């Protein structure tokens, strides 16, 4: 969820305070609506569909707790209460009734509001991601069998290690689906917390530590409010350290401490926090070789490499390619709101000739493009695109025309020269087949 999709309804009869809160949250990028009348606010719930309601406790027409009760009768919405009476009693009453948090007015520090809202936003975002995770393709057992076709040993290893707390190290080339496998590991573990991943190669070294462990307000220039790190957000869940091989030696030492002691500190804090997150790491590099070269800590390697799993490249699973392609075509078509395409034998043969150096990720990208450009009910070889060494696909046995010519020859051979049957097998018209036979001078 992005901030623009996170809708906040503010209800406060004090208009100046309402405008102040709206300005603060507008500047943060949230979608905000403000009303002074709680009865009017009840009327806009269906149209506005807020993700969070911020309500004053003391209002003339209806107090905040009664307003919250009215709202929660028909829907589950998070509440933050505003009180000018910062007493333990009012705060406890609001929290008992279902409020997530409360803030006091006058608002002496805008960060009080920012932090309270950010906590709700972060939690809802992680919950949403977990719901999507549970509804994704790997929840369906038949989909398991298709996605793991040719690597059933990987699925077995995941099922064996999932119920434990063992750290899992995922090895595999770029695009083999290491992140997906980590999500499946999390799903099979039954952990109640969220799945959180971080790409260690995509974040500058000076920012990676704060992303992992969080920071306190004022810890450094630009730290305007407290921020939770990935380890804190993943508590009771799982965290994937993708491309862990790209982490600096300094940060490797800090990660080792987390793995050994299960504790960490936010930057700028003296308070030690505990983490129960299940750790998985992934890399496309040879960590043992990096240890020999002094580029990766040996002690960290052994901490991470408790349960190594190797994910094979797609070229080693090509005997299952038709099953995988057929499944992905259905997934992509549904994503685009289109009917799944029929895939002729010639197209499968054409794609089997390719080594797929980008693995599943590349295959999915190629199929997405093919579905977009395809005009008929069947995918054709031109929809897939040319095969070139340096491009998305690889030349194997010649260029596009060479492979198409070979596919036609094979189809004619398999049908004993019956052009009608061969055309059906190739997914083209008899007229087109006659034209191509003449073009390629096939005898």
Image (cartoon, rainbow, N blue to C red):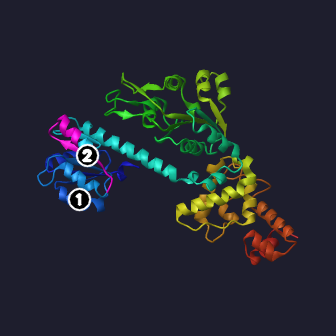
Residue 186 left/right relative to 353 = left
Residue reaching furthest to the left: 60
Which residue is denoted by mark 2 in the rendering?
97
Camera-side mark, 2 or 1? 2
Residue 81 colored in magenta in the image? yes
In the structure shown, which secondary structural element does the residue marked by tag 1 occupy? helix
Residues drawn in magenta? 75-93
Going from N to C along the chain, the mark reached first, 2 or 1, is 1
- In depth, the one of 28 and 322 nearer the eye is 322
User: Residue 311, can we see it?
Assistant: no
Q: How many marks?
A: 2
Q: Which mark is residue 308?
A: none
Find residue 401 and report its horizontal and vertical position in percent: 76, 62
Q: Is residue 92 above or below residue 258?
A: below
Name the residue that disc number 1 marks.
42
Decide: marks 2, 1 in contact (CB < 8 A)? Answer: no
How far apart, in angstroms, are the residues tagged by discs 2 and 1?
A: 18 Å
């Amino acid at each position: 969820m992005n901030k623009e999709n996170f809708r906040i309804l503010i209800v406060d009869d004090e208009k100046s305070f309402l405008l102040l809160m709206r300005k603060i949250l507008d500047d943060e990028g949230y979608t905000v609506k403000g009303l002074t009348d709680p009865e009017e606010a009840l009327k806009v719930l269906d149209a506005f569909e807020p993700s969070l309601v911020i309500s004053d406790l003391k209002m003339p027409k209806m107090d905040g707790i009664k307003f919250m009760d009215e709202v929660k009768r028909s829907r589950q919405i998070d509440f933050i209460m505003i009180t000018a009476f910062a007493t333990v009693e009012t705060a406890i009453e609001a929290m008992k009734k279902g409020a997530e948090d409360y803030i006091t007015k006058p608002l002496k520090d805008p960060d009080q509001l920012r932090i309270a809202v950010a906590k709700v936003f972060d939690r809802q975002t992680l919950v949403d991601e977990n719901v999507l995770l549970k509804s994704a393709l790997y929840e369906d057992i038949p989909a398991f069998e298709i996605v793991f076709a040719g690597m059933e040993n990987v699925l077995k290893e995941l099922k064996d290690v999932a119920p434990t707390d063992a750290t899992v190290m995922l090895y595999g080339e770029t695009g083999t689906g290491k992140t997906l496998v980590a999500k499946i590991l999390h799903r099979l573990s039954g952990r109640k917390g969220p799945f959180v991943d971080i790409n260690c190669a995509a974040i500058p070294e000076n920012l990676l530590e704060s992303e992992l462990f969080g920071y306190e307000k004022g810890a450094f220039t630009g730290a305007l409010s407290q921020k939770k790190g990935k380890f804190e957000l993943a508590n009771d869940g799982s965290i994937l350290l993708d491309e862990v091989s790209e982490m600096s030696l300094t940060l490797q030492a800090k990660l080792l401490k987390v793995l050994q002691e299960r504790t960490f500190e936010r930057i700028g804090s003296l308070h030690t926090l505990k983490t129960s997150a299940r750790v998985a790491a992934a890399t496309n590099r040879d960590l043992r070789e990096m240890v020999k070269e002094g580029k990766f800590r040996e002690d960290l390697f052994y901490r991470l490499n408790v349960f190594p799993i190797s994910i094979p490249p797609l070229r080693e699973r090509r005997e299952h390619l038709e099953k995988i392609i057929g499944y992905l075509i259905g997934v992509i078509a549904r994503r685009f709101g289109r009917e799944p395409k029929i895939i002729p034998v010639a197209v499968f043969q054409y794609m089997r000739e390719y080594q797929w150096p980008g693995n599943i990720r590349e295959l999915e990208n190629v199929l997405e493009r093919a579905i977009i450009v395809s005009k008929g009910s069947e995918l054709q070889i031109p929809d897939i695109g040319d095969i070139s060494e340096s491009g998305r696909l690889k030349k194997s046995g010649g260029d596009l025309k060479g492979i198409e010519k070979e596919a036609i020859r094979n189809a004619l051979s398999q049908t004993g020269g019956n052009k009608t049957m061969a055309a059906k097998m190739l997914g083209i018209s008899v007229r087109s087949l006659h034209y191509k036979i003449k073009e390629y001078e096939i005898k």
